[in-house]
Amino acid sequence: MTQSRLYRVSFHNQGQVYEVYAKQVSHGGMPGFVEVEKLVFGERTTVVVDPGEEKLKSEFENVERFYVPLHAVIRIDEVSKQGPARIVAGGGGDSKVTPFPLYLNQDNSKK
């Protein structure tokens, strides 16, 4: 009996932290991006509905795969069971400005 892998992917998006579950995660075909596909959401078998998960479900409704820039990824965990997909505040307050990552050239041989 083979068990399919399940990943929890946490990443920054527009000042918030998204946490989603997917069956496939890879470096993809685009350098500098993580490819996330086959999203998994909770079943609607209970009367209680999580509005955060419903928002994510509607946002990614017709998405087969999406790409997250490497600098936006917080962590990727392989998990044994699924939890709720959610969006949480990114801790940046109400700022409309997101800092852009700065990659400095560390090659000091050209002086």
Image (cartoon, rainbow, N blue to C red):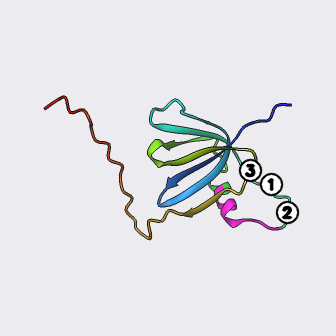
- The extreme left residue here reads 111
Residue type (three-letter) at the residue carrying disc 1: Glu
- Asked whether the residues under the numbered discs 1 and 2 touch, taking CB atoms below 8 Å apart as contact, a structural biologist would say yes
Between residue 78 and residue 14, name the one nearer to us: 78
Residue 63, compared with residue 28, is above or below; it is below
> From this viewpoint, which residue is outermost toward the bottom?
94
Task: Determine the secondary structure under disc 2.
Answer: loop
Residue kind at label 3, given as amino acid type: Gln
Residue at horizontal 44%, vertical 46%?
71
The x, y position of residue 55, in whole percent, is 65, 61
Quadrant placement of the C terminus: top left
Q: Is residue 64 left or right of residue 91?
A: right
Disc 1 crowd rating (10 Å Cα; few below 14, some 14-19, many 20+) is few
Query: Which residue is disc 2 drawn over?
Result: 46
Residue displayed at 82% across by 31% down: 2
Q: Earlier in the sequence, mark 2 or mark 3?
A: 2
Instruction: Name the spot of residue 69 as percent of width and height, x first.
Output: 47, 43
Q: Which residues are magenta?
A: 48-56
Residue type, label 2: Thr
Callout 3: SS: loop
